[in-house]
Image: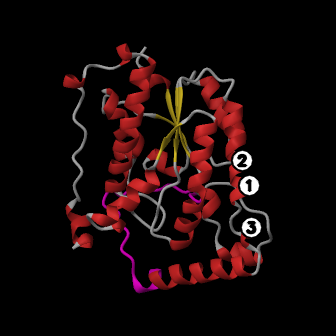
């Protein structure tokens, strides 16, 4: 059996290709490194978070998963401040993307920060600092609770017959508050990966490195979600790690390097070049 039938991507809406389209999702790009046919859709479990351990375990059991890619730590950093300040202390642990309203993917969608975006971004940053100064930071973000939840998920996966778990770091993003909170989660994820013998994939660091050679925002469709270029870059990074663990598990799974399908080249699409210039 092909290993691609035993690979599961579990995470937020971006494992489905949101908002640019499933055909150019990070999951589909990653599977190309295994010779996965472009017409075959990857197996995904979307709209899960750090409180979705039972759903992830059940999906792994039902699909007889051997290789699990976990993309977590995003929903916990996106809570609107109006809910934090006026909606009580209980966080809402679900997707920020509605599954009841049809969404039309847009492969050309790019984040173009306006003056209003910059003002709202700065205001969120000031409010976050004010909460921290008042000793109320946990109302917005609780790193210790996130660490406990992540540890619980990985513990629940331990009895499963998984050959490998790839734990993706939280993704960097243009929103200053979410980016700062996700940066705080990096040591949580690296420690959890080491403790539970997962392969850690530093997506945050890769996206941050883009600041040195082209426009950082070209990787994003909006303040929080990846653009076509972002999906391409993250998919290639995940694909490199996935190819490694699949080959280590069973070299016969993969063709020789000479016949591996070429991965997409890393270049800015024309519309992103306009932002970078």
For residue 58, side relative to residue 123 (left or right) = right
For residue 95, side relative to residue 205 (left or right) = right
Q: What stretch is highlighted in magenta?
A: 96-117
The earlier-in-sequence mark between 1 and 3 is 3
Q: Is residue 181 magenta?
A: no
The one of 197 and 87 positioned closer to us in this rendering:
197
The image quadrant that residue 219 belongs to is bottom left
Mark identifier at residue 145: 1
In percent of width and height, residue 222 lies at 43, 66
18, above or below 2, in the image: below
For residue 203, side relative to residue 228 (left or right) = right
The one of 40 and 204 positioned closer to us in this rendering:
204
In the image, what residue occupies the spot 74% across and 67% down?
A: 138
In the image, what residue occupies the spot 61% across and 55% down?
A: 95
Circle 3 residue:
138
The image quadrant that residue 77 belongs to is bottom right
Disc 3 is placed on an element classified as helix
State whether the magenta stretch is mostly helix, strand or loop.
loop
Circle 2 residue:
149
Residue 276 in sight here? yes
The image quadrant that residue 63 belongs to is top right
């Amino acid at each position: 059996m092909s290993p691609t039938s035993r690979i599961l991507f579990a995470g937020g809406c971006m494992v489905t290709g949101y908002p640019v389209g499933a055909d150019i999702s990070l999951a589909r790009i990653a599977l190309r490194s295994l010779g996965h046919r472009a017409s075959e859709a990857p197996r995904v479990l979307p709209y899960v978070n750090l409180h979705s351990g039972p759903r992830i375990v059940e999906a792994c059991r039902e699909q007889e998963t051997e290789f699990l890619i976990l993309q977590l730590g995003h929903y916990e950093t996106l809570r609107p401040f109006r809910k934090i300040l006026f909606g009580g202390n209980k966080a809402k642990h679900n997707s920020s993307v509605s599954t009841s309203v049809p969404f039309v993917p847009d492969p050309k969608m790019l984040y173009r920060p306006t003056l209003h975006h910059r003002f709202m971004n700065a205001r969120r940053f000031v409010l976050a600092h004010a909460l921290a100064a008042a000793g109320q930071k946990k109302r917005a973000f609780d790193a210790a609770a996130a660490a406990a939840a992540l540890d619980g998920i990985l513990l629940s996966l331990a009895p499963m017959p998984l050959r490998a778990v790839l734990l993706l770091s939280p993704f960097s993003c243009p929103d200053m508050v979410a980016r700062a909170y996700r940066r705080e989660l990096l040591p949580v994820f690296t420690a959890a990966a080491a403790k539970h013998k997962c392969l850690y994939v530093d997506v945050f660091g890769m996206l941050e490195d883009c600041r040195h050679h082209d426009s950082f925002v070209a990787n994003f469709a909006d303040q929080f979600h990846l653009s076509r270029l972002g999906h391409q870059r993250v998919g290639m990074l995940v694909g490199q790690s996935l190819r490694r663990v699949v080959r280590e598990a069973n070299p016969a799974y993969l063709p020789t390097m000479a016949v591996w399908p070429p991965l997409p080249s890393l270049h800015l699409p024309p519309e992103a070049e306009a932002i970078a210039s």
